[in-house]
Image (spheres, rainbow, N blue to C red):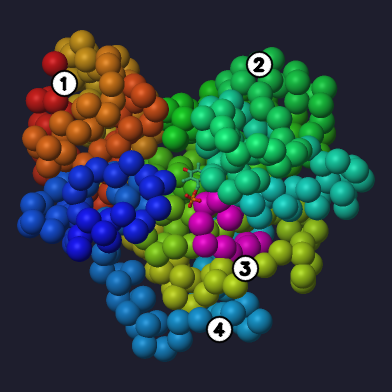
Amino acid sequence: MYKQAVQSVMHTYGRFPITLVEGKGSNVWDDKGTKYLDFTSGIATCNLGHVPDEVKTAVAEQVEKLWHCSNLYHIPNQEKLAQTLTENSVGDQVFFCNSGAEANEAAIKIAKKYGHDVRNQANPHIITFKNSFHGRTMATLSATGQEKIQNGFTPLTPGFSYLPFNDDASLDALIAQKPTAVLLELIQGEGGVIPADATWMHKMAEICKELDILLMIDEIQTGIGRTGTLFAYEHYDIEPDVITLAKGLGSGFPIGAMIAKEHVAKVFSPGTHGSTFGGNPLAATAGLATISQFVESDILEQSNQLAAFIWSELQKLSSNKQAIKSIRGKGLLIGIEVDGNAMEYVNKAREEHQLLIVVAGPNIVRILPPLTASKTEAEQFIAIIDQLFV
Ligand SMILES: *Cc1c(COP(=O)(O)O)cnc(C)c1O
């Protein structure tokens, strides 16, 4: 019976051999009652920990009232969430959808429309970067600068080209090509936890401003407090024209968003883009309750203290351990470059220490603690890392 059920799901994921049935804070439990320390946060999604009380209460209240009504009608919490996102970012208006790929799809569409309407381009062109990850739909995998994601799915969506990340030659190419937009992550997440160089990024932003190239930042993994500020762009003295969000926005309730500055947002008019579920009453409530925590509580301050502790302990460990080659990332998006196969460490952490972590490429172990993890949990994590690596 169980075997049949398992085989009824299409095999698009390599899954770890455990079944999680419950979660609270930094912990999850499997169907055998084993407790795990979850330092993946459902891949940078449960940033407030599992089943956070404030979001749970808000969603439970909304469940009693109205689940869905379509975007043919006004949705108060969607409007409040949009207002909160724009008041706390450089953006002016928000489009809601249901996932990261859809947020990037919306960004790609608005860039193409901007190319046609504002820059009078017959063939709008978007530059992305090697090693990036922007999603699995046809347009977003075409935007992704990794052949392993694109293999088998040609013909790709046209209109994209890829430049090397953190490379000055890419800035010259940008000036030469004057694309409609650039789309990039400030810390390449899936590609190996690689932060953009601050000087390089700043120069790129200046070029974009000068040449009316849209600067579109994919904050799907870095956003919602993951790097120590609400959005990662706040670390870089830049003003994106477009920001995409998903993962952490709903604390696990599926919701995505594309935030744009006014001069960009205005190229979308009724009928140009849409989504049945996007920002529906339940999703918008989860998003609003999540973002309200960031605006109203001291969670960012707490998470920065936690990050400072984890970083200093990891750095101490790495200087004594051959198996750890480097530590990189920002805030609570941390990559450990290991000597050997990262997946072996991930498996050992789960099997022998009940610690959940993930990989980001063949030799990077990726650590994504809940922003709400306690000092005790962080100490527990460091003790495990100490045992895991020689
Ligand atoms: C996860 C991710 C996506 C895709 O999000 P989905 O919700 O899986 O479609 C896009 N960009 C980045 C940077 C991501 O980390």
The residue mark sitting in front, 1 or 2, is 1
Amino acid type, mark 4: Cys
Residue span colored magenta: 93-103
If you read the primary sequence from the N terminus, does the residue marked by circle 2 or circle 4 appear first?
4
Residue at image mark 1: 389
| Callout 2: SS | helix
| Callout 1: SS | loop
Using the numbered discs, state the Cα–Cα distance from disc 2 to disc 3 in whole angstroms: 39 Å
Where does the image place residue 368, in percent across and percent down from the top left? Answer: 31, 41
Which of the image's four quarters has the N terminus?
A: bottom left
Q: Is residue 383 visible?
A: yes
23 or 373, nearer to the observer: 23
Q: Residue at x 86, y 41 (%)?
A: 123
Residue at image mark 3: 275
Q: Residue at x 68, y 39 (%)?
A: 156
Amino acid type, mark 2: Asp
Q: Residue at x 27, y 16 (%)?
A: 340
If you read the primary sequence from the N terminus, does the residue marked by circle 2 or circle 3 appear first?
2
Judge from the rendering whether residue 371 lies leftward or rightward of residue 124; answer left or right.
left
Judge from the rendering whether residue 342 lies leftward or rightward of residue 316; answer left or right.
right
| Callout 3: SS | loop
Q: Are marks 1 and 2 in contact (CB under 8 Å)?
A: no
Residue at image mark 4: 69
Using the numbered discs, state the Cα–Cα distance from disc 1 to disc 4 in whole angstroms: 52 Å
Where does the image place residue 88, in percent across and percent down from the top left? Answer: 53, 56
If you read the primary sequence from the N terminus, does the residue marked by circle 1 or circle 4 appear first?
4
